[in-house]
Amino acid sequence: MFSHVMVGADDVAASKQFYDATLGALGIAPGTHDDKGRVFYMTPTGVFAISKPINGEAASHANGATIGFAAKSPEQADAWHAAGVAAGGTPCEDAPGVREGSAGKLYLAYLRDPAGNKLCALHRMPA
């Protein structure tokens, strides 16, 4: 359904360091810069990008928005979370762990990136 997700950041270098660490924990190669200073993470299933806002105003996070990244296991979600905290991210929501609801049993880990964007590593647990 989605082709790409792009987040705004005033400090693209700090955000790249954070995303290189967290996405690296999920097996994704470090991001690459384009000629406009944006950073792109290319995968077979989609693209994630970081950019300074093109309107020249300060970047801001969306209230109520969450960007989810697929994790292959609870251990990989934990590694993503630890890498994010070590690279300047801030834990948010509950501690990483299993949540049960209408979507089934999920292992979730939440962080805010250096620009304040809310992120989640999600692993769908077997039924």
Image: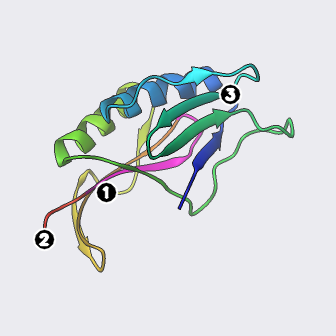
Q: Residue tagged by mark 3?
A: 38
| Residue 55 covered by magenta stretch | no
- Across and down, in percent, residue 96 comes to 26, 51
Residue shown at the point (49%, 22%) measured from the top left: 17
Crowding near pointer 2: few (<14 within 10 Å), some, many (20+)?
A: few
Magenta highlight range: 114-123
Which residue type carries mark 1? Asp
Which comes before the other along the chain, label 2 or label 3?
3
Q: Residues within 10 Å of mark 3 (few under 14, many from 20)?
A: many
Distance between mark 1 and mark 2 Cα atoms: 22 Å
Looking at the image, residue 12 lies above or below residue 110? above
Residue drawn at x 38%, y 56% as measured from the top left:
93
Is residue 116 inside the magenta stretch? yes
Tell me the residue that label 1 is attached to: 94
Earlier residue among tags 1 and 2:
1
Residue projecting furthest to the left: 127
Cα separation, mark 1 vs mark 3, equals 31 Å
Find residue 43 and report its image quarter: top left
Regarding mark 1 in the picture, which secondary structure is present there?
A: loop
User: Quick one: 93 or 127, which is closer to the camera?
Assistant: 127
Judging depth in this view, the residue of 86 and 105 nearest the camera is 105
- Visible in this render: residue 68? yes
Q: How crowded is mark 1: few (under 14 residues within 10 Å), some or many (20 or more)?
A: few
In this orientation, which residue lies closer to the viewer: 107 or 28? 28
Q: Residue 127 carries which label?
A: 2
